[in-house]
Image: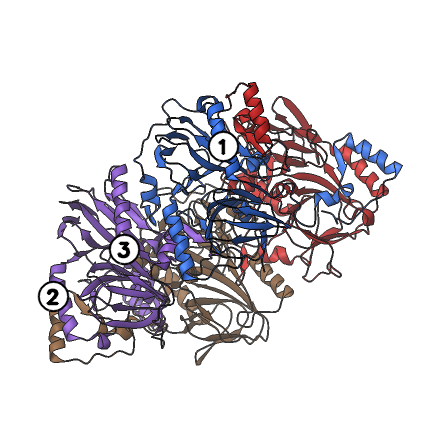
Chain colours: A red, B blue, C purple, D brown
Amino acid sequence: MAVPETSVPETSERLDYYRRIGAHHILPLWVETQRFVPMRPTPTYVPALWRYDDIRPLLLEAGRLVTAEEATRRVLVLQNPALDGFQGTTRSLYACLQLIMPGETAPDHRHTQSALRFIVEGEGAYTMVDGERIPMAAGDFIITPSWTWHGHGHDGDQPMVWLDGLDNGLLALLDTTFFEPARPGGAAATRPAGDTLARFGSNMLPETFRPDRATSPLVHYPFARSRAALAAMAAAAPPDLCHGHKMRFVNPATGGDAMPTMGVFLQRLPAGFRGAPYRSTDGAIFMVAEGSGRTVIGARSFAWGPRDIFVVPSWASHAHEADETAILFSFSDRATQEKLGLWREERP
Amino acid sequence: MAVPETSVPETSERLDYYRRIGAHHILPLWVETQRFVPMRPTPTYVPALWRYDDIRPLLLEAGRLVTAEEATRRVLVLQNPALDGFQGTTRSLYACLQLIMPGETAPDHRHTQSALRFIVEGEGAYTMVDGERIPMAAGDFIITPSWTWHGHGHDGDQPMVWLDGLDNGLLALLDTTFFEPARPGGAAATRPAGDTLARFGSNMLPETFRPDRATSPLVHYPFARSRAALAAMAAAAPPDLCHGHKMRFVNPATGGDAMPTMGVFLQRLPAGFRGAPYRSTDGAIFMVAEGSGRTVIGARSFAWGPRDIFVVPSWASHAHEADETAILFSFSDRATQEKLGLWREERP
Amino acid sequence: MAVPETSVPETSERLDYYRRIGAHHILPLWVETQRFVPMRPTPTYVPALWRYDDIRPLLLEAGRLVTAEEATRRVLVLQNPALDGFQGTTRSLYACLQLIMPGETAPDHRHTQSALRFIVEGEGAYTMVDGERIPMAAGDFIITPSWTWHGHGHDGDQPMVWLDGLDNGLLALLDTTFFEPARPGGAAATRPAGDTLARFGSNMLPETFRPDRATSPLVHYPFARSRAALAAMAAAAPPDLCHGHKMRFVNPATGGDAMPTMGVFLQRLPAGFRGAPYRSTDGAIFMVAEGSGRTVIGARSFAWGPRDIFVVPSWASHAHEADETAILFSFSDRATQEKLGLWREERP
Amino acid sequence: MAVPETSVPETSERLDYYRRIGAHHILPLWVETQRFVPMRPTPTYVPALWRYDDIRPLLLEAGRLVTAEEATRRVLVLQNPALDGFQGTTRSLYACLQLIMPGETAPDHRHTQSALRFIVEGEGAYTMVDGERIPMAAGDFIITPSWTWHGHGHDGDQPMVWLDGLDNGLLALLDTTFFEPARPGGAAATRPAGDTLARFGSNMLPETFRPDRATSPLVHYPFARSRAALAAMAAAAPPDLCHGHKMRFVNPATGGDAMPTMGVFLQRLPAGFRGAPYRSTDGAIFMVAEGSGRTVIGARSFAWGPRDIFVVPSWASHAHEADETAILFSFSDRATQEKLGLWREERP
């Protein structure tokens, strides 16, 4: 559109002109070209890290202060420090922590936002997706696809916590949000537990299967299997200079991303790993599944341990380091960017 | 995420809690659920129409007030009346009008934003895309693909005006903007005029062709051909109840949208057409190529004639009416929404 | 499966064994490994050329000897000299010449074979494809898609001849042939002439279009446009060492081959062109649209002029030479081979 | 091409004409139209069944009569009773049984044919695919992709037998066969055992993975997992009227068939299942993995038990019946037919 360096001097004649066209809801591009087309990504949000040790007591306090019934979902939003209230963890994505207490249920609903769960702690809770009860175990990655009925329940005896990842910022910009609350009897199981995993997680598809949505028909990626895949990858080849051993969760019906808007990854950094600096256009949210280390983002170092959460903005150079073998879960809008031909990376 | 109806009463204990977690950049989702997940799209921008008769004198005045050299691109942005300065015509898209005067040139540059041109008036100007001089005639649709060098020039003797459509809002949200200014000698033609149209516009592809970008290799869709296609469609079948006869510009290498982020359309409304109400999730920007009529958007009627521009927001019910045979050019972020599984429409 | 060099000596014990297993319809692979898995393609068909000057009188004679009514289609099959009767021009494909006399009609029918027409001479005839009358002019490429109703008629006053290309050999191997004869009233036009070309040949698609078959919705590729595309290509860049300027006809709804089984090409050899040797795994059938020259296939040279037809077998090295500017139409099963990951080429 | 009912009377004039054009390698289509375009598939091969109890002693006898060194691969071809020697089990496919004795090895080679293995009996053998040793257990489905180095070895102490499925008939028709024998040192393992399964069989893909071939990067589909998938499918929903519970093996990088030319399936028939008649255009080869029953093909009933092999021709109506719970493995050229838009089925 415009060369960023341009600067058009203001004269009284021009200022008068700007005022007159403004009355027609018309603006002169040439006074704002740098903002309009910057030379490179200039995110308005910043790197940040939340320590799980800090958050956990606050989550449990929420469990006492607000009932599940009142809150519907007892969710804490990790708000980017540089963004205003409820503007997201990055511009396009939200990371939240959800707490469910023993015996609680969250009623069925559905929305066009895609949601991912990465299970942080506890056992005995489940997500009901499209009539199937999906058991949750620490490290599992679970999807509630766009416009799919889902609710939660908890039959265990300890608090259960998971990370929610959502594409609300993107859907808000696109004005494509729809929501529908619980139907009477909507949360009843109509399929046996484990059905989706067996039918779609075994490198086979039902002979008559035809995809009817953009999201994976497989909604449950157990940690046991994902972790083993990383271990095998680590046994077979040296780590990538930047990423260690990194895998992408995929939709078995397409080989593409598990969700249409978000790319979801799991990576393993061997003990002592000192990653080379890397940057890409997808701002990403990481949760530490195992291990400890730090990530140097720009000039700042963010030390992390198990269950900590951190944000790497778009095009921010960053390098991972692991003191002990670490596993990082992450998600970003890379799936969107790749579909639109916009994703770009820079590596040594 | 949350049932919109929820309302969690504020107590002093809760307010204290909210303040304490706020210090950690944590927000309680349950106080903002309606905003977070509305029941349906709630665009923050509004329907609007710009009359070309109003804009044209202002454009020509810009031609006197600001030199091409100062402005780089002499572009007026059509700013949605409900959005703040430089926030877009819709949330994701910009519609602008660009003026080039006889003898002027706009230097080469490139950016990751996709840009479309729809030629409004004049003759003799050209866009140089990737080393090929693309002639411009009224009604032509021309693409400057993402990250492709392009400049403009004008060998005619009258002012030349075109509509620019850009996906800046979307790229800003995704933080994927890159820009590179003119290279020395960058604007020199390296391919004969008409090359792209002949090579890629004839339902053939070079035997060795492999797509190397997400945008169409065909960048010029002459109005003569597009208009004839609509006429043939009109001769062969009755108009669609809502759209009249409507076609989508496609990438001949894929059959998909001509640009990765934006869908671009041309539709013909026969004289006397009274369209049924329609809505879809992609807010669209229309320019009238020919004819006159009106579009009823929600409760308001927007009368239009040749070269007028109007905006229909996401999920706004609207109906087109034509007094004389009309041709409407339009573009929206539908290409993005369809790729992400988000596009939705409602029709009688 | 087996190393071609293997040779297992025959002993009386082994011969007895072979006889005994033969009674169970079981064969020992090790006695036939060279045939089973040869080192490289060993086509059982040969290069050949048919001179149109030889064929034309025979075609016209057929017009006297057999009525259209008797023959249904008055078609002469170009039988590969090395294959038995009705085994094809190559193993997978047939090239035929069809004659229709003024006033004749060929009744509607449909079959799962894909058929292409390349118009050789005459004017005034038409093919009726799916209710649309497609006019035929010399050099036009016309498709009758798999399982689509089609018939022919001739309103002109001279004999009309076209080349038929069919995938019968492939469909015979796959046992996927279905045929359905004329319906009462089946050949009536239900769409205006030129409809398909305007709707699908203009780099636009109807807004509601969804492909419902594997073949292009565009069935008519007029020579005027194809020839101009080649000329533009020739003006823009030097010829390919082997192919001159070569283009592939594509399905505008996908960017892939116009037909699912056959690739169809048009190439231009500038006067004086001396092509480098080339080979690929798709045996091809060429018809000379314009010009004269020769093609050296292996050790033999085949001189050709307008309307001559020749066959280049799979993996046969060949080089084209043009004395005057030539245009060659060709088709092969490359579309099938590429879909199956089997296509291979070798070039200097 | 032609209406099958046509019959053009032979006259002496016509016979003379046919003889004269025959000298030019030209045939009159109208004398052979029924064969050229039959009304429906008319396979030249027939239903057949091989009892494993009959074959097993013959296989073991081959183990004594021919050394692995002599045979390179000790393979018995199941020749369709209606086809001539080495013409295939169907027209496009071969089913073979391969025996490897303890301590034997089969040297590395590669060919463009795709090969599948379905392990019949024994343990301790392995296939080396692309430098990885793939262990074989009964019921496993293993791929040796087109043009990929592979060899076999056997560290166990009992004979090992597997079913080979190959697309030789199709590749012969297309003349796309290439073969390359063992390289010195070619069979050495370069990747750890289990690598492919972990990396590509866990619903994840390496972050940097880009498919470089048409075949699945996953080459090992263990029976334990496939069998469990069928059991889960059976627990979740009633059986299909024709197929029981049937799944297709897929390429995790695309969601399409595991091999480009062949579809591979596993299906479970509950005890007492009486299937409805079914037919499709892909002739299929079945091997019984478990259970007993019969398949009625046309008017004949073929009783089967574990490890028996049978062929159902294209478009032959057939119905499966199971006395005890049965699992059938099968493969066909359906993957080819679907890519070419030719596959068709008929069901109640």
Q: Which residue is mark 1?
A: B57
Res. B136 image quadrant? top left
Q: Which label was assigned to residue C331?
A: 3
Q: CA distance from mark 1 to mark 2?
A: 71 Å
Can residue A253 be seen here? The reply is: no
Pointer 2 and pointer 3 on the same chain:
yes
Q: CA distance from mark 1 to mark 3?
A: 57 Å
Q: Nearer the viewer, mark 1 or mark 2?
A: 1
Res. A194 image quadrant? bottom right
- Kind of residue at disc 2: Pro
Compared with residue D264, is residue A138 higher up or lower down, i.e. above or below? above
Q: Which residue is mark 2?
A: C57
- Name the one closer to the observer, A176 or D205: A176
- Name the one closer to the observer, A232 or C279: C279
Pointer 1 and pointer 3 on the same chain:
no
Q: Chain of mark 3?
A: C
